[in-house]
Each structure stands twice: as C-alpha cells, then as structure tokens.
Image (cartoon, rainbow, N blue to C red):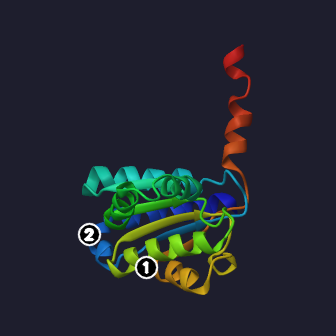
Amino acid sequence: MGQKLDYMAKKLAIGYIKKFDQIKEQGKGFYFYSQTKGSGKTSLMASMGNALMKTHFASVRVLTTNNLLHAIKNTFETEGYYKLMEQIKRVDILMLDDFGGERPTEWVNEVFYTILNDRMTGNKITFFTSNTEIEALQYGESIVNRVMKMAMPIKFPEESIREGIAKKTKVSWLC
C-alpha cells in the first residue's frame, strides 16, 4: 500500500511540474505529511524544487523551519532582518521542511503568520513537509487556515524509505 501512495505522490508531483505555468497563477503548493520520519517527503519536495528551477526557471528556497527561525533571530535589530524577510516574501517558491516541528511560541506564530500572510496575499507558492496533519498543527487558527488555502495535503506512507535504503547499503561497500 505504501508504494501505491508513494507512486501517487510522484505522479502528482510530475503533473504539477508539467502544468506549473497554469498552477502558479493560483499560488498553490503541496503539504506533504506523514508521522514517519524518512518517508520521502523532503526528498520529493527537493526534487520538485530542482525540477521547477530547471524547467520553469523559478527561484526556489528550501529551509527547515528551525533554520529559518534561527536565521531570523540572528538578524534582529539589523537591516539583515528586513532583507531576509523580503527574500522569503518574494522568492517564487518557498519550501518549508519540518513545518510544525518547532515549539509554537507567540513569537513563532507571529513570524509564520507574517511569512504566510505575505506569501498568500502575493499569490506566492509555498510547499511544506510535516509530521503532522494540517488540522493538528499547534499554531494559531489563522496560520492553519492559510496553510489549508495555500497547499494541497498529500499523505505519505507510514514507512521509512530512508531506513530501507540504509539497510540495503549498510555493509556492502565494506566487503
């Protein structure tokens, strides 16, 4: 069953890339989720980013949400903050990895609200990977509603592709 879902996710990704010129007007991305770490969410998202850069010359930025939050904190009280936020706001496609994995403090809610609201009103595409269904995200309702509007949810199988690859390649190169 996992392979069938994985096949469907890949098929949707290929269709998205082929029809990107029509889809980009809608500002709609994907929300890949699965409780299982290593299920292929980030890998497929990154592959889509590479394909969109090559075939449609889109600007793409891939960040884990924790790295994004650290970068924002490191630019406080400098012009770097405004520059970083402007880059995040304007990039054609923003890909946020591990969305919902950070502690949902008031500050985190404010940052994500600002980013997602700017991207939504600007009709910019945002992709997400998460270990949580959209409805179960621990952010404020305004953030959850924006994610629902901005991205189509795709459930990944509850099996680790990474674990399977690790088992296959574990010792073969040592012999």
Residue shown at 47%/51% (left/top)?
46
Instruction: Judge by depth and name the residue closer to the eye, 1 or 24.
Output: 24
Mark 1 / mark 2, whichever is N-terminal: 2
Instruction: Judge by depth and name the residue closer to the eye, 19 or 75.
Output: 75
Instruction: Tell me how many marks there are.
Output: 2
Q: Which residue was labeled with disc 1? A: 117
Left or right: where 44 falls relative to 160:
left
Q: Indicate whether 51 appears above or below 99.
A: above
Q: Which residue was labeled with disc 2? A: 21
Q: Indicate whether 20 appears above or below 39.
A: below
Asked where in the image residue 85 lies, by quadrant, the reply is: bottom left
On residue 155, the disc is none
Left or right: where 138 falls relative to 99:
right
State if disc 2 and disc 1 touch (CB < 8 Å).
no
Image quadrant holding the N terminus, namely bottom right
Left or right: where 104 falls relative to 89:
right
- How crowded pointer 1 is (Cα within 10 Å; few <14, some 14-19, many 20+) is rated as some
Tell me the kind of residue under disc 1: Asn
Instruction: Judge by depth and name the residue closer to the eye, 30 or 99.
Output: 99
Q: Secondary structure at mark 2?
A: helix
Residue shown at 62%/82% (left/top)?
140
Tell me the kind of residue under disc 2: Asp
Q: Secondary structure at mark 1?
A: helix
Image quadrant holding the C terminus, namely top right
Please state the horizontal and vertical placement of residue 174, each as a whole percent of the image. Answer: 71, 15
Residue shown at 53%/81% (left/top)?
148
Asked where in the image residue 137 lies, by quadrant, the reply is: bottom right
Please state the horizontal and vertical placement of residue 55, each as a whole percent of the image. Answer: 27, 53
